[in-house]
Amino acid sequence: MTALSILDLVRVTEATTAREAMDNARDLAAHAETLGYTRFWVAEHHNMRGIASAATSIVIAHIAAGTKTIRVGAGGIMLPNHSPLVIAEQFGTLATLFGNRIDLGLGRAPGTDQLAMQALRRDPASSEYFPQDVLELQALLAAPQPGQRVVAVPGAGTEVPLWILGSSTFGARLAAELGLPYAFASHFAPDQLDEALRMYRTFFKPSKQLAQPHAMVGVNIIAAETDAEARRLATTQQMSSTNMIRNSRGLSKAPIDDIETYWTPLEKVQVLRKLACSVIGSPETVRSGIDALVERTQADELMIVSDVFEHAARRRSYELIATAMAAREPQPAI
C-alpha cells in the first residue's frame, strides 16, 4: 500500500518569526508521528524570507530532537552547493545523534536565485558533476576502505540512505542507474511526472541499498472540513506561487476569500499549471483525489505538502488526510 509522508516548507508567515516557523515544524513532525506518517522532510532554500530551512541539517536536528520514531531528513540537500565531505559529516553527525531514522534526499538545482548562487560561491557548471558527487558522498558514508585517507568523522559507516530528487527524466535515470529511491517534485513541477516514473522503473538496477524501485510522488494536499474551506486555505499557496512569478518572494500570506482578485488571468494559468498535482477539499474529496493519483502513478509513497498559513489549520489538514487514508496500511520505511 502507499505510504504517506510530509514535506514541510518551514514557512515564515506574516504572523510568525523564523524561530516560530522552526518550532512549528518540530511540533508538526511530532504530531505526524502520532498520525502514522512515515517520514518528515525539509528542503534547502536560500535567500527566501518566507522559508526558514536554509541551514537544513540544523533544522533537521531540531526536528529530530522533538520526535522519536518518524524518519526525518532532507528533501533535499542541493548537493552542488556543497562538498560531498561536508554533507557526509553533517548527516553522519545526524545519524550518530538520532540513529537509523535520518534520510538524505539529493537534488542538483541551486535552491535559490542567481545572486544567492554567487553568494554561495556556486559554480554554475557544478550541477554537471552531480552524479560523481552522489557517488563520492555514498562512498564517504560507507565503511572506510583500506588505505582511505579522507574519512568523514562522523559519517563513515553510517550508510545514511540516499534518495535522488528531481523534476525531470535526468534524476529518474540517475536514480535507476544507482539503484536508489526516487522522489519526483510534482508538487511544483508536474509536467514530466509520468515519463520520469516510467524511465525510473524501466531502467532500475538493484543495489545494496534497494532491491526494487521505490517511487515517491510529491503532491499538494490541503484538507479541511468542507471543500469550500479547503479552497480558501489553498489561496495562501496560490498567492505564494503568484508572487514567485512576480519575482516578489516574501512572507506567507493569510488566506483570502477570492483568489481571482489577486492574480491576473495569465498568472492564474501559470500557477494552476505549476500546482496541477494538487488535491484540495474535504476528507472525501481528498480520499478520491489520492486514489486517482495513486492509480495513475502507482506511487510507493506520497510526499505531501500542505502549505497552510495557520499552524493549527495545517495540523488539522494532516489529521484529516490521515483519517481519509486510514484504510491504507503504509509500507515499511526504507
Image: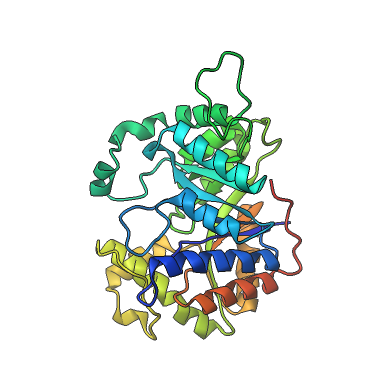
- x, y percentage for residue 247? 25, 61
* Location of residue 320 by image quarter: bottom right
Whether residue 237 appears in this view of the structure is yes
- x, y percentage for residue 301? 64, 54
Q: Residue at x 55, y 17 (%)?
A: 148
**Number of labelled discs?**
0
Classify the position of the C terminus by image quarter: top right
- Say if 189 sits above or below 93 in the image: below
Q: Residue at x 61, y 36 (%)?
A: 202
Whether residue 306 appears in this view of the structure is no
Of 232 and 267, nearer the camera is 232
Q: Residue at x 55, y 41 (%)?
A: 93
- Say if 194 sits above or below 9 in the image: above
Q: Is residue 250 left or right of residue 108?
A: left
Classify the position of the N terminus by image quarter: bottom right
Q: Residue furthest top?
A: 147
- x, y percentage for residue 111? 37, 49
Q: Is residue 37 left or right of residue 252?
A: right
Query: Which colouring convention does the figure follow?
Result: rainbow
- x, y percentage for residue 330? 73, 58
Of 2 and 36, nearer the camera is 36
Q: Residue at x 53, y 30 (%)?
A: 152
- Say if 19 sits above or below 283 in the image: above
